[in-house]
Image (cartoon, grey):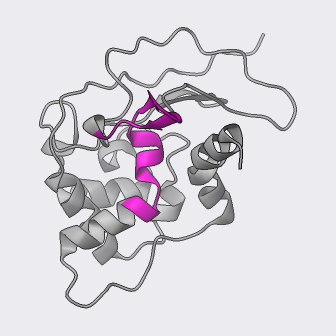
Amino acid sequence: MSLSLTLTLSLARPFLLSLLGLSLVQAGTPGQSVIQRGAYLVQVGGCNDCHTPLKMGPKGPEPDMARMLSGHPEALKMPPAPQLPEGPWMISMAATATAFAGPWGVSHAANLTPDKETGLGGWTEAQFLQMVRSGRHLGQGRPVLPPMPVQNLRAATEADLKAIFAYLKSVPAISNRVPAAVEPVAAH
């Protein structure tokens, strides 16, 4: 398989799962800890696909695991979003796979690490569950924007969502302030 096809399929995974409506619900393994279960769900759910920036490796782009789940890099200042493609195309993506432009404007993958200032460190489990149920930031703010597949997460059991949150709270905290979403530009 060519590198470009492999990269395209890897980056398209969250979108394909979303379109197919696949759920994260899987049977737990006996003896598996809640954090191990959460790690498994984060892996199969493709969370790293958007929330871990890519870096150039010896064989092409690869996840930068030193910045695992830290979201769009704070230091990467993005130029204005490109004009959206026509026809059935509807999204543009940054090379880091952490910033996305579409009809909703520009969204940046959030910092999912437990950093108290820039990540989920100040979130409660109840806020995380409410975010999934409502599709709103902190369960009551702005809508969670594409490509975040909240509709897939809603299909997960409460136990699985709690396991995901427990795992996210267990990873190393990384200070990385992700830029705010950008509203869509009005059509002329």
Measuring 18% from the left and 50% from the top, which residue is drawn there? Answer: 171
In which quadrant of the rendered image does the C terminus lie? top right
Is 4 located above or below residue 10 in the figure? above
Is 136 located above or below residue 27 in the figure? above
Query: What residue range appears in magenta?
Result: 43-65
Measuring 19% from the left and 88% from the top, which residue is drawn there? Answer: 31
Task: Pinpoint residue 166: horizontal percent, then vertical percent.
Answer: 19, 62
How many marks on residues? 0
As drawn, the residue found furthest toward the bottom would be 30
Does the segment drawn in magenta span residue 5? no
Measuring 60% from the left and 31% from the top, which residue is drawn there? Answer: 104
Task: Pinpoint residue 15: horizontal percent, then vertical percent.
Answer: 62, 50
Q: Which of the 4 image quadrants contains residue 65?
A: top left
Task: Pinpoint residue 156: horizontal percent, then vertical percent.
Answer: 42, 72
Q: Which of the 4 image quadrants contains residue 177?
A: top left
Q: Nearer the viewer, residue 110 or 151?
A: 110
Is 107 located above or below residue 126 in the figure? above
Is residue 186 rendered to the left or right of residue 160? Answer: right
